[in-house]
Image (spheres, helix red, strand yellow):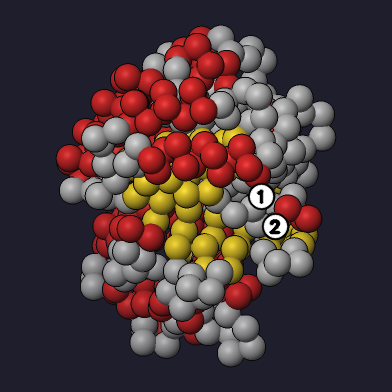
Amino acid sequence: MLPPPSSDRLNLLGLTRAGLETYITELGSKPFRARQLLNWIYKRGEQRIEAMTDLSKQFRAELAQRAEVRTPEIAEVQHSEDGTRKWKLKADSGQAYEMVFIPESDRGTLCISSQVGCALDCSFCSTAQQGFNRNLTTAEIVGQVWLACRELAGAEGAVEAAAGRVITNVVLMGMGEPLANFRNVVPALKILLDDLGFDLSRRRVTLSTSGLVPQIYRLAEEVNVALAVSLHAPDDALRSELVPINRKHPIAELLEACWHYLDEQNGRSVTFEYVMLQGINDSVQQARALARLLQGHPAKINLIPFNPFPGTRYRRSAPEVISRFRDELLGRGLIATIRRTRGEDIDAACGQLAGRVVDRTTVRLGEKTFALVAS
Ligand code: SAH
């Protein structure tokens, strides 16, 4: 499953604080050195081990032989007219995955990927059309944030962004299904939250899932981040068509898992994403059905105008239809917002990330795909 290493050295970006302490102890050094290393890597943005001058020369030399701080390599950068930036990052064998930075007046959001492609096959998503190749490693997930910090830090060179000045929010809403890559995503989230790591607050890190129910329960035991769920339909028949994993984990089970997550994590609310597809899921009756589903629960609904991509059969709902849908929800006491589309001119908007993926899933929609997804 792992990519051929571009270097034999261990990538320190893949280690949580605990992992780094263990590693350093194995090298025969004291665990407190982990703090110094984390400070260099995440607070000062230093990539060169030899420049970490409060570590002994000998230790630096030994460490540099075995380990490194390796970021993903950039294949291409695109700038949108609205300030959004998209980076295409190299995976192995000519493949690529993408990350997007979205600046707003009061925050800067980095949207990162968790897989090269996606196996879930949601019918309205461009990533799905490409199929699935592999999971990103923890180092590749953390490396996106580290790299974006460096790219956005400006002339000073210091990774001030790591202290939350440029990148204030990180969302796992890029390519892939994060909960299908649980084993690598969870340590990455821990590094994003760690005060010796990126030190982001748990409300500013959002994991978005298409609804892998067992993994939502597992997540509740492991880490505390904001949860977003791609709902997209108010009933199982339609949701199963749009988000095929619904056939395995229907809406009632999914919502149960969401409320459990909030209870366990003391969370305020779950955000439900709902893509607005003309004539498919955007009627007033469907808004009412959605309201009935979520009324009385700590839920926020984020309506996403559909972003088209080549070959899609869907169209975006008209603005007045989206507003009416929102008003119907608001009128029933729900919190509902319309997501502003950003970066559309560079294909950086929700559901438009495609990268370059060599599909390895042979059977789509069947049990085999689900087995692959849940590994
Ligand atoms: N796999 C995860 C993470 C992707 S997040 C998930 O499904 O939640 C990306 C968000 O954009 C999801 O809510 C997804 O359903 C939505 N999306 C996908 N394709 C889209 C499109 N073409 N237009 C608008 N939103 C889309």
In the image, taking residue 359 as reference, residue 337 lies left or right, namely left
Question: Is residue 58 in view from this perspective?
Answer: no
Identify the amino acid type marked 2.
Answer: Gly
Q: Residues within 10 Å of mark 2 (few under 14, many from 20)?
A: many
Q: Are marks 2 and 1 in contact (CB under 8 Å)?
A: yes
Q: Nearer the viewer, residue 201 or 329?
A: 329
Q: Nearer the viewer, residue 17 or 277?
A: 277
Please tell me which of labels 2 and 1 falls first in the chain. Answer: 2
Ligand 1 has an atom within 8 Å of the beta carbon of the residue at disc 1: yes
Give the secondary structure at mark 1.
loop
| Quadrant that contains the N terminus | top right
Give the secondary structure at mark 2.
loop
Residue at 46% in and 58% down: 170
Residue at 29% in and 69% down: 195
Q: Is residue 98 above or below residue 127?
A: below
Residue at 63% in and 73% down: 151
In the image, taking residue 147 as reference, residue 317 lies left or right, namely right
Residue 206 place in picture, x, y as percent: 41, 51
Measured in 3D between alpha carbons, the distance from the residue under mark 2 to the one under mark 1, in whole angstroms, is 5 Å
The residue that disc 2 covers is 343
Q: Is residue 257 above or below residue 300?
A: above
Question: Is residue 320 in view from this perspective?
Answer: yes
Residue 248 place in picture, x, y as percent: 43, 14
Residue 53 place in picture, x, y as percent: 42, 87
Residue 99 place in picture, x, y as percent: 62, 55
Which mark is drawn over residue 10? none
The residue that disc 1 covers is 349
Identify the amino acid type marked 1.
Answer: Ala
Residue at 82% in and 35% down: 310
